[in-house]
Image (tube, rainbow, N blue to C red):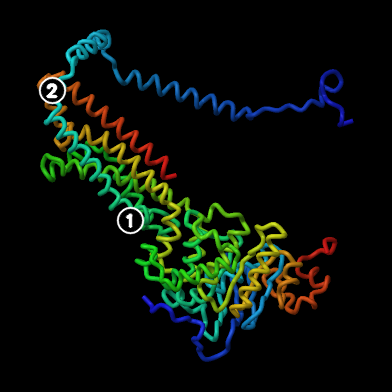
């Protein structure tokens, strides 16, 4: 009896129904969509777009572009160039410095490495607080501490990167396979040896990936730090905007674009070799 | 760091030789014992196989010996020294004397075969040497010898993740023997291998440990392999020893007692 295929007619009661979601789940999914639409509407209403400004925005934009053209390329050397090199130095030093702070914090935050729960929580708190402050805000703080200049920029980049790098490193550490660590423990290797030969080889690709990725981000971030006086090409950009020298602004923006593209290419190349 | 080159095997503390377990018990959750007071003495040579169903505490027993698992109570006497009481550096020094082979090989995948074998010496080599990969020439020579002995003479520079399961376990055995252990523990060394490779790996383990005079305690699922290679079989059931004797003495009713049921025998 039960072997018969249910199609229609007297067999109809035997047709087994299938629904992906229960009625409750369907209502739940509908509510989630409603919440998303509602929050978008709410957000748009909060922004309070002024119609007059919106209306002539294309006009203003076109005007700005016309003023920017042609870019004042003669202005590039030496001012913009020096600032650009300084930006790269800020990004590189900031990234290096952030790793000095992030590696110990990542080791403390990774639950399989540090088994003391309060220390895990402490490290995580440090990492979260680093991330909760934008690099521009960090830059404002360090400009107040060190005065305007590249030093403030380096520290701003470093302190913002710590949270990012530390979190990703801690995750990479937690994803390591316990097996090799167990094997080296059984061989009587001390902690440092286990880290070096059991854990480091496992996180190495992730480590270099994170380092390159963060350096890439930091090149872009350090370009704007100058707006608050923390050195780099942002200072030149800020000056040019303040003096309405739009041809120079164009030069600076082009220089930043070029650097970001080159950084992207370099990072992609290196990463493809690493993995 | 400790001086290099002096083997630890010659050290002869007073008291009984070999490994003796006294009242070894382990509870992962209080009130639910996994090991119920194991009393065993292991000879100074030969292979002892521990058989029993999954979850009966075989693995726990073997991991208690080198303290990868903390025993709840009991004594682990290696040449008269109680390993259960050791902490920190003393425990580490004791572990150097005990080699271990794992079911999942536990090699460092991204390192070469050679470095995996040499990592058996990490308990002896100072950190800077390990970092710069400047292992003592004596260790390197021995690693090459062991690679020859396990049948991987050409594989030294290959990465561990490029090897097959059987080859990885051979590297695992070489790494354990690199320690010049006084005792070798093998936790299901053949369970991840095909039957033919499993026999080959057991033959290799037997041959090399016999030549080095190292006693072996091996956890094994396969009763036939146990009977074929071990001089002594210990049957465990529910955290207790229910059979202890030579392979010839292992009768179907013993297997029934160890594993339960009878249709499978």
Which residue is depicted at the point 23% across and 36% down? A222
Which of the chains bears the disc numbered 1?
Answer: A
Q: Residues within 10 Å of mark 2 (few under 14, many from 20)?
A: few
Q: Is residue A137 above or below residue B255?
A: above
Q: Give the farthest residue toward the bottom.
A: B14
Q: What residue is shown at x 84% (from left), y 26% (from top)?
A: A5
Q: Position of residue B90 (x, y in %)?
A: 44, 78
* Tags 2 and 1 touching, CB below 8 Å: no
Number of the label disc, if any, that sits on residue A74: 2
From mark 2 to mark 1, how far is it between C-alphas?
47 Å
Q: Quadrant of residue B225?
A: bottom right
Residue B112 position, x and y percent, is 48, 57
Q: How many C-alpha atoms fall within 10 Å of the one at disc 1: few (<14), some, or many (≥20)?
A: few
| Closest to the observer, A84 or B37 | A84
Disc 2 on helix, strand or loop? helix
Q: Circle 1 sits in a helix, a strand or a loop, which is it?
A: helix
Quadrant in the rendering for residue B22: bottom right
Can see residue B30?
no
Q: Is residue B235 visible?
A: yes
Residue A130: image x %, image y %? 29, 45
**Residue B159 against residue A255 in the figure, above or below:** below
Left or right side of B264 for A66: left
The residue identified by callout 1 is A104
Q: Chain of mark 2?
A: A
> Which residue: 13% across, 42% down?
A144
Q: Earlier in the sequence, mark 2 or mark 1?
A: 2
> Relative to B67, is B213 above or below?
below
- Is B253 displayed left or right of A149 in the figure? right
């Amino acid at each position: 009896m039960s072997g018969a295929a249910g199609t229609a007619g007297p067999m109809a009661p035997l047709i087994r129904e299938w629904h992906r979601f229960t009625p409750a789940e369907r209502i739940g999914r509908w509510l989630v969509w409603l919440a998303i639409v509602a929050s978008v509407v709410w957000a748009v209403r909060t922004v309070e777009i002024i119609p007059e400004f919106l209306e002539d925005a294309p006009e203003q934009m076109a005007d700005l572009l016309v003023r920017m053209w042609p870019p004042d390329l003669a202005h590039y050397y030496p001012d913009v160039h020096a600032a650009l090199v300084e930006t790269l130095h800020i990004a590189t030093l900031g990234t290096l410095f952030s790793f000095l702070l992030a590696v110990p914090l990542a080791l403390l935050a990774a639950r399989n490495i540090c088994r003391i729960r309060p220390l895990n929580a402490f490290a995580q708190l440090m990492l979260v607080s680093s991330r909760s402050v934008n690099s521009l805000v960090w830059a404002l703080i360090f400009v107040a501490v060190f005065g305007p200049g590249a030093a403030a920029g380096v520290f701003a980049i470093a302190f913002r990167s710590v949270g990012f790098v530390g979190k990703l490193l801690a995750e990479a550490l937690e994803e390591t396979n316990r097996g090799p660590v167990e094997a080296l423990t059984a061989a009587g290797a001390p902690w440092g040896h286990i880290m070096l030969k059991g854990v480091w080889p496992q996180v190495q690709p992730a480590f270099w990936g994170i380092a390159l990725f963060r350096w890439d981000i930091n090149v872009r971030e350090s370009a704007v730090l100058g707006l608050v006086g923390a050195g780099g090409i942002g200072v030149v950009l800020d000056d040019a905007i303040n003096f309405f020298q739009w041809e120079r602004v164009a030069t600076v923006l082009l220089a930043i674009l070029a650097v970001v593209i080159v950084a992207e290419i370099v990072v992609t190349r290196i990463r493809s070799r690493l993995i | 760091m400790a001086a290099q080159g002096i083997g630890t095997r010659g050290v002869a503390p007073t008291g009984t030789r070999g490994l003796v377990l006294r009242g070894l018990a382990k509870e992962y959750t209080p009130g639910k014992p996994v090991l119920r007071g194991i009393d065993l003495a292991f000879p100074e040579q030969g292979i002892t196989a521990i058989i029993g169903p999954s979850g009966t505490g075989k693995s726990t027993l073997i991991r208690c010996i080198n303290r990868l698992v903390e025993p709840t109570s009991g004594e682990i006497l290696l040449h008269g020294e109680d390993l259960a009481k050791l902490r920190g550096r003393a425990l580490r020094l004791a572990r150097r004397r005990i080699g271990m082979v794992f079911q999942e090989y536990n090699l460092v995948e991204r390192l070469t075969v050679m470095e995996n074998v040499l990592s058996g010496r990490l308990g002896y080599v100072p950190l800077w040497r390990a970092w710069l990969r400047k292992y003592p020439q004596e260790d390197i020579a021995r690693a090459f010898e062991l690679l020859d002995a396990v049948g991987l003479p050409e594989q030294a520079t290959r990465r561990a993740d490029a090897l097959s399961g059987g080859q990885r376990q051979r590297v695992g055995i070489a790494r354990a023997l690199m320690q010049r252990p006084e005792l070798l523990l093998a936790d299901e060394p053949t369970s991840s291998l095909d039957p033919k490779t499993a026999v080959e790996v057991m033959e290799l383990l037997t041959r090399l440990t016999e030549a080095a005079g190292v006693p072996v305690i091996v956890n094994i699922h396969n009763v036939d392999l146990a009977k074929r290679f071990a001089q002594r079989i210990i049957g465990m059931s529910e955290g207790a020893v229910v059979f202890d004797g030579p392979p010839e003495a292992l009768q179907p009713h013993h297997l029934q007692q160890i594993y339960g049921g009878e249709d499978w025998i």
